Image: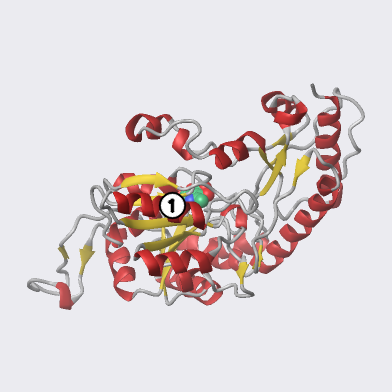
């Protein structure tokens, strides 16, 4: 079904579009959602905590809160950890907007530290430089949002050492890394971070359509996140100022409707059962790409952090466009014409107009991230890709590069 002959010329009709990421849904997922839809609970029912328990069991962390998106999760973490106006929150420039926006939502000041050239994750040395810079201004960094970019774990031991030394809150934006391992442990995220953020957007490892979750070992933080996820309402007797009856609820702090539905969680539970299989496939795809692109000096293949096992949400291939004198834009468009719809992860966040205008960031502030942006292309990476697909994708990338100028 997925067979397609290798490209012979530019006019070959496109029979299949390859996006950089795609969900994998099968009959058991559909059955799980249908069952939930036929139940009494579409939302606020028992499937939510079932999903939360399954997430804890798989990824560690004592507590989980499933929410409506990864972005909602980050917002709730920011509120739950008590970030306030003028608190400084540092993240990587190579991440999705939400990793930095969560600081902006609560009036905190977002800042960045450059990435490590090899792992593409926050460089602990650059982070320490930034923290020390703030100390010279008599300011303490409140929190660090470290991103396990593409599925490659950060240097969590170094980050934890810095956390202990400089006393900041550590968040793992783990949206890319479900199933990654650090020091042979899949349950690493909540061991190092105060809060861990997950996303279940369709391009991620497992999906609920839209959705996210926060994992933590901190009972109070978990409680706060659960309250804020549903308008800040509480019925907990120990928190009430008075109690008019069983219907009675109070609000002590305004929250949001960041709830996820039961049928989404049913999908999440079903998807989670398949995560190991998905990961195996993602790692096999990465191995294929590593072999093909690793022997060609025009490419830089992603490397894996020390003591880690990559989860390959993305396959960030770097192409030395600058040295080859080839336009990334033209190359990108040519691949698209041939059915290969890549993406670039990411436009460095500090270069977004909002961040430039409001916080004064400029080109050259984080040179490794900026160089990475010039070269990076996320090529198709999702479990349903076949050997034929991979052959087509890789040979088309190489042939297009051979012909481009
Ligand atoms: C690193 C990172 N953080 C946060 C998010 C936000 O997740 P969501 O799309 O579920 O809101 C994403 C989603 O792309 C992400 O990649």
Nearer to us in this view, 79 or 367: 367
Q: Position of residue 155 (x, y in %)?
A: 55, 63
Find numbered disc 1 in the image and state the secondary structure of the residue it sits on. helix
Q: Is residue 213 left or right of residue 177?
A: left
Q: Is residue 368 visible?
A: yes
What residue do we see at 72% from left, 58% from top?
Answer: 282
Q: Position of residue 388 (x, y in %)?
A: 86, 47
Q: Is residue 174 left or right of residue 221?
A: right
Q: Residue furthest front?
A: 136
Q: Is mark 1 within 8 Å of ligand 1?
A: no
Nearer to us in this view, 176 or 132: 132
Nearer to us in this view, 50 or 32: 50
Q: Can you say whether 349 is above or below 183 in the image? A: above
Q: Which residue is mark 1?
A: 129
Quadrant into which the C terminus falls: top right
Q: Position of residue 326 (x, y in %)?
A: 74, 25
Q: Is residue 280 left or right of residue 167?
A: right
Q: Residues within 10 Å of mark 1 (few under 14, many from 20)?
A: few
What residue do we see at 74% from left, 60% from top?
Answer: 283
Q: Can you say whether 5 is above or below 180 in the image? A: above
Q: How is the image coloured?
A: secondary structure
- State which quadrant residue 312 falls in: bottom right
What residue do we see at 92% from left, 29% from top?
Answer: 8
Q: Position of residue 392 (x, y in %)?
A: 85, 41
- State which quadrant residue 281 falls in: bottom right
Q: Can you say whether 348 is above or below 102 in the image? A: above
Q: Is residue 194 visible?
A: no
């Amino acid at each position: 079904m997925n067979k397609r002959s290798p490209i012979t010329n530019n006019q070959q009709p496109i029979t299949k579009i390859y996006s950089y990421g795609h969900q994998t849904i099968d009959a058991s997922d559909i059955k799980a959602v249908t069952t939930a839809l036929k139940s009494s609970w579409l939302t606020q029912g028992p499937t939510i905590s079932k999903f939360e328990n399954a997430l804890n069991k798989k990824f560690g962390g004592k507590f989980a809160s499933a929410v409506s998106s990864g972005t909602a999760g980050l917002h709730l973490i920011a509120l739950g950890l008590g970030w306030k106006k003028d608190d400084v929150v540092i993240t990587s420039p190579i991440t999705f907007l939400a990793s930095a926006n969560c600081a902006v939502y609560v009036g905190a000041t977002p800042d960045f530290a450059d990435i490590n050239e090899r792992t593409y994750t926050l460089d602990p040395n650059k982070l320490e430089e930034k923290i020390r810079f703030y100390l010279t201004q008599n300011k303490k960094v409140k929190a660090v949002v470290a991103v396990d970019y593409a599925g490659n774990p950060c240097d969590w031991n170094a980050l934890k050492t810095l956390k202990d030394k400089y006393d900041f809150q550590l968040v793992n934006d783990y949206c890319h890394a479900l199933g990654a391992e650090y020091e042979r442990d899949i349950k690493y995220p909540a061991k190092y971070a105060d809060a861990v953020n997950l996303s279940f957007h369709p391009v991620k490892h497992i999906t609920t359509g839209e959705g996210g979750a926060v994992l933590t070992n901190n009972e109070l933080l978990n409680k706060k996140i659960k309250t804020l996820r549903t308008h800040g309402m509480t019925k907990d007797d120990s928190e009430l100022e008075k109690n008019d009856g069983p219907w009675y609820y109070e609000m002590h702090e305004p929250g949001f409707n960041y709830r996820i539905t039961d049928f989404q969680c049913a999908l999440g539970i079903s998807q989670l059962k398949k995560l190991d299989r998905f990961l195996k496939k993602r790692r096999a795809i990465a191995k294929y790409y590593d072999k093909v692109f690793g022997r060609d000096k025009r490419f830089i293949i992603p490397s894996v952090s020390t003591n880690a096992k990559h989860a390959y949400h993305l396959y960030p291939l770097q192409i030395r466009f600058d040295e080859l004198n080839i336009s990334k834009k033209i190359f990108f468009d040519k691949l698209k014409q041939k059915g290969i719809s890549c993406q670039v992860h990411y436009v460095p966040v500090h270069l977004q107009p909002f961040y430039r205008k409001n916080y004064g960031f400029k080109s050259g502030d984080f040179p490794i991230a900026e160089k990475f942006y010039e070269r990076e292309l996320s090529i198709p990476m999702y479990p349903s890709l076949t050997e034929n697909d991979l052959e087509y994708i890789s040979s088309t990338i190489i042939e297009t590069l051979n012909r481009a100028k």
